[in-house]
Every structure is written in C-alpha cells, then in structure tokens.
Amino acid sequence: MKVAILGVGLIGGSIGLAARTRVGAEVCGYDPDARVRSRALALGALDSEADDLASAVADAEVVFAAAPVGALAQTVKLALQAAPARCVVTDVGSTKRLLADAASDERFIGGHPLAGAETAGVENARADLFDGAAWYLTPAKGSTSGVLYERLYSLLRGFGARPVAIEAGAHDRLMAYVSHLPHVLANLLVTQTSGLLGEPSERMPMVGPSFRDATRVAGANTAIWTDIYMSNSDALVAGIDELLVRLQEVRGWLDSGDAQAIGEWNERARAAREALLGAGLTGGAEGELVRELRTSVPNRPGVIAEIALALGDCGVNILDLVLSPSQDNRQGTVALWVAADHLERASAAITGLGFPVVQA
Amino acid sequence: MKVAILGVGLIGGSIGLAARTRVGAEVCGYDPDARVRSRALALGALDSEADDLASAVADAEVVFAAAPVGALAQTVKLALQAAPARCVVTDVGSTKRLLADAASDERFIGGHPLAGAETAGVENARADLFDGAAWYLTPAKGSTSGVLYERLYSLLRGFGARPVAIEAGAHDRLMAYVSHLPHVLANLLVTQTSGLLGEPSERMPMVGPSFRDATRVAGANTAIWTDIYMSNSDALVAGIDELLVRLQEVRGWLDSGDAQAIGEWNERARAAREALLGAGLTGGAEGELVRELRTSVPNRPGVIAEIALALGDCGVNILDLVLSPSQDNRQGTVALWVAADHLERASAAITGLGFPVVQA
C-alpha cells in the first residue's frame, strides 16, 4: 500500500507512523516547510519526502491531506488533479462542508479523526494516536467509489481507529455542538473568571474539578482554532443562538425563584446525559458480541456510501467491512460486521435501501 | 476534641471518618433519618448517635452543620442555640450569604469544602475525601473569635484540607463563576446536543474529550443542585448576564467573518487560563519552601478573621496557624506559616492592618 501525506504535523506525522508500523505501508510525505519534512523523515513517520505535492501523490493509492484547515480546500484540489485514477483522496479537517466541491469526484472521501487537537507538531506524533478514536468519514451518496471507500476504511481500521460514516452537513452541526461550542464556552469561562478575580497574580482562586474540566481546552492553539471556528461559523452561530435562548430561559427561572422549573430542567439534563452516554457506549466496545451480515449491491459509485450513511443515520457502527466484486464486476457482495444488538436495525436499514440481506 | 455532626451524608460522614481516624476526635452525630445515623455508626463515621440536635451538640467543641442547603440556615440557628459558649459552629454549604444571620455570633464561621458533590450518601464517605482540597472559611470581621477560628482551622488541617479565608459575598460570586455556571452550561450542552441528534437511542454520537470534560457534571443530583442554584441565584444570574453579553460578542465576530477578532479573543482566553492556572498552583503545593512569621494582636473577636481575610485578599495561602494568648489574656501572638514567595506580601498585608510583624 502506497500512502501519500500532504502536511506532516501532528496528525500527518501520526498517520505516517501508524501506516508504516501498523499496516506496513510505504509512506511518502510532502510539506511546504522542508525542515518539517526532514524532521518527519528523521522521526520515522515517512519512508521518503517529496519536493512538491504532485510528486508525492504521483503513484499513491491513498492520499491524506493533512494541511491546516485554511489551506485544506486548495490542497485537496491539487491532490485530486495530480493523483492517479484509482487513488482515494481524503483529508483530516475538522469541518467538512468546505470541501463540498471535491465531493463530486468519486475518489474523494472527507475524513475527520477525533484525536489530538491539543498539541501540535510532528514532534508529538505517535503511531497510537488514533487507537480507539472515532474517525468520521463523509462519503457522497451517488458518487463515492465503493472500492475506494473500502480501501480507506480498512486502512483506518489498521490504524486502530473506528471509522463512522456521516453526511457532511450533519457532521459539521454535530461538531459545532460537541466540540466548537464547548471550546467557545471554555474560553468565555476563563476570561470571565479572570475578570472577576481582578489582578490574577494577586489572587489565588482554589476551584473544584468542574471548572478545571470545563476549561481544560480554553485558549487552544490560536492558529488552528481560528481556522476551525471560521470554517464552521454558520453551524457554530446556530449553536450559539440556541444556547442564548436556553440560557435566557434558565436565567428567568433563577430570577423568579422557580425551584420546580430548575429541578425539572436538571432532570431533563440528567436524562439527556444518560441517553448520550448510553449512545456513545454502544457499538465498538471491546469484548462485545459481533455479528456479520452480507448484502449484494450493484457495482456503481456511491452504493457503499449510501449503505454506510444509512447505518450511521440509525446509530449502527460498522465494526468491519469487506467488499468483494463478482466475477463479471457488475455486482458486489458487501460483508459487514456490527454489534449483535445492532443486527436487526442494520438489516432493516439495508433492506430499506432495496438490497437483499443475509445474516451470516 | 469533641465533634458534633448534624447531617451524616457524604460530607458529614467523611468529616466523621476524618475526625475519628486522623485527629482522634470523639464524634457524635445527629441526622433526622434514624437509619442514616445507624449506618454512619456502623461504618465507623461516628462514636455515638444522638436522638436530637440539641443532645448532639450539648458538650461539643466543634459543630459541623452538614444538612442539605435548604435546611442549613435552620440547622445552624438551632445549633447556635444549643451549643456551649466556647464551641465553634460551622457548616459545609456551597453558598455562604444565606447564613449571614448567624455571622453576628462570634462562635459561627461559615465553611465550604470543595469536595464530593458528584456522589451522595454516607455509603460513599471516605476519611481522605478532603485530602489537599480547598476548604473555604468565611469568618466575619469584627465578630469571629480568634481562638475558635484557630481551633477550626487546625482541625481542618488535620483532615488534610487547605483552609482558605474569604469574604462570604466574594465566595458566592466566585462559586457562581467557577462552579454553578459550569454546571448550568454542562446541563445546556447535553440537552442541546441530545436535541440535535433526534431520538438518542437511534443515533450514536462519537465525540471527543472536550465534550465529555465539559459535560461530566451535567444532571448532577437534582435535590442538591436545585438548592445550590436557588440559594445563589442572584450571583448566578449576574454570571449568566455577563456570559450572554460575551456570547453575543463572539457570535458577532463569527457571523461577520472577523477572523482577527476571533484570534485575539482566543489569545486573551489563553492568557486568562495561564493566569488562573498559575494563580491556582501557587501556595500549598507539596515540597514548597515554607516560612514563618509572627504578629502580636489584641485579644478581641474578629482579629484573626481580619488577618485571614487580608491574606486571602492578596492571594496568600496560610499553610498553618497557631494562636497563643499572653499571660494576662489581653494580647495574643499569632504564628503563621506561608509559602516563601508569599512572605513579603503577607508581612505587608499584616503591617497594613496596624499589627507588628516579625519574620521568624
């Protein structure tokens, strides 16, 4: 497997290490900063470095665009121009709609590993950075190639990650709520609290764990996070608007002394947390029962994307996936492994798409 | 040392365990629920149980009111009525102004250990619950007895806690910002996110650590937290109002695409976080250099409170404190231990109150 990495910082470097040590891939890297390339080579994240983007991807089977969010759209565009016809191109950006232009190319699948935003630089790269981490993939219905989706999926599984298919817009809304908004609030909490305390050097706050937890990500890397906030600003603004309404509501109950409303609101939060935790803990946990199902699909672009997205939509995590084309290459058999308690739901979803399902 | 505990849940039970096993105190407990008393006795948190509040405190030297916030004011009032003349009465409530009535009694010192709000019940009580934890004390200038302050202070040190003096109003504002507001935001984040995902049982979100950290305290015990929110509602409303303004500001920058403003705002948050962390890490850390200073004060109520609050105001943590009355009982010598790099600041603050300082 020949892998090309465009941008060898923390994420790109970790992909290189994981690809070389865990999958035995041959990794070529390009970075606009030649010193970064040399460092990545010295650290064992690359087998070779390229002087330009086109050389790096020339004979690649998988390309990871791991440039900063601000440079990502251009990097992906150039990669698709230079990469071979049967090469899958993906990225690692934390928002996905800004790559919508690339989505019409059957070789492109947007990606986003949930790992490692707090530190930066290839010096911090690790082969185990993606162990057990969710890795969102945003294949496009009707265009993404099934063969290429399977290739990328298997590679990410080889890294130790858990790939999850999701529609690009849903991904960005989800990230606005579960990542970007918590970062905004962490920033606001530290700013507001430091203002309360006056001259911080002259005042020692001793605070409980809730504040430390809520503000651990405050003031994260400014270059990275300004790009992230701006690239997902509309979804984040929508999240802030919803929060403003909800905050006003709670403020009203506090101000009028409505203890009953506060208690009921807290109970709803408890239920929501349990539902989210429960949902987050299903699928993919170690030691769970895994079941296999098979389906037969026409060999046209976008079919695997359609199945992966349908299963993602109904909360089924695909634990593993193998695609076998038929002899005449017009049909394909897809074998899927899912958690045992997701089996019926997965079968129903695939049947709902019009494909026959056999539980193995 | 005879200790009485009124309300033997998680905090009261842990006080009992710490007092018995670490300080060798004799602990009598009262709880309106007789089964809870028996359980506390069986778990070794008490030497004896009392059938009513007055019997429990009758010959106590230190009384801890550890009832739920909603019953705290009444519990403290009854304790002060029944307790001996030379007994210190304190509480463990998370807001302090609601006990302002008690503050005119020289025997009362408000208290608030920063420990253990997430679980409840005497079954979870532990002798080491307060190890290294801040324990806020809100003595009243002009009334709190110095002898009683020292007794309580030493006892809490014996538990392994780090007592910090702070004015009651400042305490409540601080808690609104560093504890109650983060809890409100945690509740709102889980509620809002579960709404985004539709039917939670059918949708698996896989989220990064920032969301888990920011929402760990969501939906905390409703009975306890409704009391806490309501008892500090005005300070919390002020905190929410400030947050609403700041959120609107960030929303504006995002909406207008002002990346520079977002970047500068993130840098301010980074600076604020570093200042808060730096401040939080000074004083009281293991292995730091400790220096002693002594001062001579008139033996009148409130003097120790005045010194403790002045040192708290300028960020000095008192690591240890011993009060020695003179032969004629009209003067007293106070020996204080502070971190070496707080020595000059502490000396200046005490000199500023008009008391002579000797660095030992």
Image (tube, coloured by chain):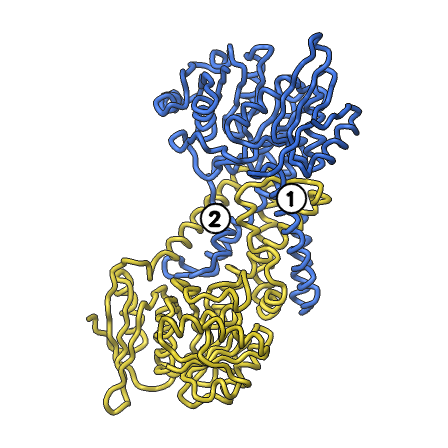
Chain colours: A blue, B yellow
Q: Quadrant for the C terminus of chain A, please.
A: top right
Disc 1 residue type? Ala
Residue A75 x, y percent position in the rendering: 53, 21
The residue lying at 40 percent from left, 88 percent from top is B86
Q: Which of B244 and A325 is in front in this view?
A: A325
Residue B34 x, y percent position in the rendering: 58, 79
**For numbered disc 1, what is the local secondary structure?**
helix
Q: Residue furthest left?
A: B360
The answer to whether residue A217 shows anywhere in this view is yes
The residue lying at 51 percent from left, 65 percent from top is B173
**For numbered disc 2, what is the local secondary structure?**
loop
To which quarter of the image does residue A104 belong?
A: top right
Residue A241's place in the image compared with A261, above or below, is above
Judged left or right of residue A6, residue A281 is right
Judged left or right of residue B139, residue B51 is right
The dot on residue A279 is 1
The subunit carrying tag 2 is A
Disc 2 residue type? Arg
Q: In 3D space, how far apart are the residues under numbered discs 1 and 2 (Cα atoms)?
A: 24 Å
Residue A115's place in the image compared with B80, above or below, is above
Dot placed on the residue nearer the N-terminal end, 1 or 2? 2
Q: Nearer the viewer, residue A130 or B28?
A: B28
Residue B315 x, y percent position in the rendering: 36, 64
To which quarter of the image does residue A46 belong?
A: top left
The answer to whether residue B144 shows anywhere in this view is no
